Image (cartoon, grey):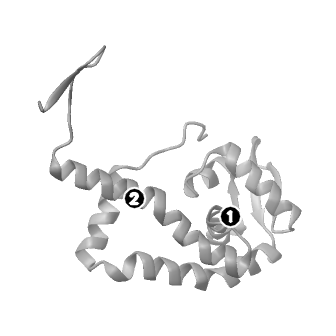
Amino acid sequence: MSDTVEHEGDGKLRWLNGQEKAAWTGLISLVLLLPGKLESPLREEHGITLFEYLVLSHLSEAPRRQLRMGELAFLASGSLSRLSNVIKRCEQRGWVVRAPDPADGRYTLAELTDAGFDIVRQAAPTHLRAVRGLVLDSLNTADQKALARIAEKMRIVPDDFA
């Protein structure tokens, strides 16, 4: 088989070589399988999703436990619409409140309540054990630095980030 293939409108496309295929297969496996493995203990022990944990965790680390919704969506690696749905559920549970940003009313702030902070504090050890067990403990320092460097190079911003 040829290394390239004709493709309408794109000229010639190159097939993946062995190294590229291994890199792609590894990445797509991480992207598709790792989130579920990280989420499972959070669901079982605390009744929250990985995305909910990330949202609450980022709020817990923010000054005054507040972030603009757009910034929070970026930090949690989600879209604004997904974040809005999660924040609504968190509001219903008493974990988060939303309010217009007093510095600029065009933006909405999400603020972590004391009850939300308690959930983060309870779930953090569970999440940390999963992160260490599934990712960090199997990597040496050079691997960890390489992973951080690759993630930085591939940083993807959601389309509706504002």
Q: For residue 29, which numbered disc appears in the image?
A: 2
* Residue 43 x/y as whole percent: 68, 73
Closer-to-camera residue (135/28): 28
Q: Which of marks 1 and 2 is nearer the N terminus?
A: 2
- Within 10 angstroms of label 1, few (less than 14), some, or many (20 or more) residues? some
**What amino acid type should be assigned to the residue bearing mark 2?**
Ser
Q: Which residue is drawn at 76% across and 62% down?
A: 111
Closer-to-camera residue (127/56): 127
Residue under label 1:
52
Q: Which residue is drawn at 76% across and 50% down?
A: 85
* Residue 159 x/y as whole percent: 55, 36
**What amino acid type should be assigned to the residue bearing mark 1?**
Glu
Mark 1 near mark 2, Cβ–Cβ under 8 Å? Answer: no
Extreme-left residue of the structure: 2
Q: Nearer the viewer, mark 1 or mark 2?
A: 2
Q: Which residue is drawn at 31% across and 72% down?
A: 144
Q: In this view, does 91 lie above or below 12?
A: below
Q: Is residue 65 above or below residue 13?
A: below
Residue 97 visible somewhere in the drawing: no
Q: Is mark 1 on a helix, strand or loop?
A: helix
**Which quadrant: the N terminus?**
top left
**Which quadrant: the C terminus?**
top right
* Residue 101 x/y as whole percent: 77, 49
Q: Is mark 2 on a helix, strand or loop?
A: helix
Residue 17 visible somewhere in the drawing: yes
